[in-house]
Amino acid sequence: AQSVTQLDSHVSVSEGTPVLLRCNYSSSYSPSLFWYVQHPNKGLQLLLKYTSAATLVKGINGFEAEFKKSETSFHLTKPSAHMSDAAEYFCAVISNFGNEKLTFGTGTRLTIIP
Amino acid sequence: EPEVTQTPSHQVTQMGQEVILRCVPISNHLYFYWYRQILGQKVEFLVSFYNNEISEKSEIFDDQFSVERPDGSNFTLKIRSTKLEDSAMYFCASRGRRNTDTQYFGPGTRLTVL
């Protein structure tokens, strides 16, 4: 079984300040973990992924995430928020043992305050 | 950069009507998926498809749903008799080889059932 919990449904930060979006996962096997971003009326764009290589993963647009097995977490961070980062962010997990489906979290809406 | 495309972007239909949602996966990808997102909710897996057959499906994917790869490029989702609760954004995704796990998503089709 696999599941994802996104701890915050809504996060607001001021432009230029750090962003932290939290994600905890549960997986029976070694997981692959993903962050996707969804801008209004747009599809899902892959931000970054972890697939058992380096635990600190860098993605597009200055985002990065750290896989912490001991904490079963995969939090998304960015040092300095930009107005264009305002969007919905989804954490997702897939177990690396014959499992096809991505299981998504409920999403975190990121608002950037000018 | 190759991308998944979906048509139409928005489909409005009457309850009880059949709809076909179309997707063109990334060329030379082998694995295909449909997900849906009811407004305000998380993205949910519907079905995965490989080698011209369904490899996994969720409880949502009942007898009213079917998928097909009618030719070498298209991947379709058919809903035989739409219900109000089928209103959602439907995302198509594709994946390359077995030992890669990144699914690339299309922009989605918004289905509205009246």
Image: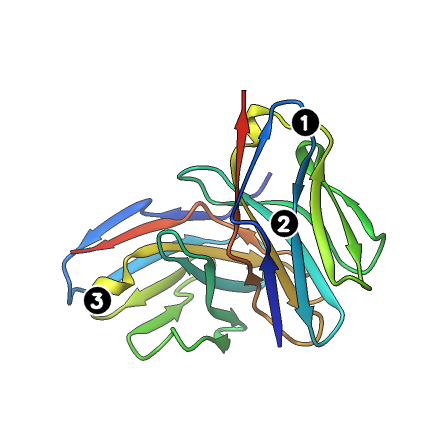
Cα distance in 3D space between marks 2 and 1: 20 Å
Residue at the top extreme, as displayed: A114
Q: Which residue is mark 3?
A: B83
Question: Label 2: which residue?
Answer: A35
Q: Amino acid at mark 3?
A: Lys
- Judged from the image, the secondary structure of the residue bearing numbered disc 2 is strand
Q: Residue at x 41, y 78 (%)?
A: B59
B50 with respect to B97 (left or right): left
The crowding category of the residue bearing disc 2, from other C-alpha atoms within 10 Å (few below 14, some 14 to 19, many at least 20), is many
Q: Specify the subunit that label 3 lies on.
A: B
Horizontal arrangement in the rendering, residue A52 relative to residue B110 (left or right) = right
The answer to whether residue A79 of the structure is visible from this angle is yes
Q: Is residue B44 above or below residue B62?
A: above
Q: Is residue A91 left or right of residue A43?
A: right
Tell me which amino acid carries mark 2. Answer: Trp
Between B105 and A40, which is closer to the camera in this rendering? A40
SS type, badge 3: loop
Residues at discs 3 and 1 in contact (Cβ within 8 Å): no
For the residue pair A94 and B54, the one nearer the viewer reads as: A94
Residue pictured at 29% horizontal, 60% vertical: B20
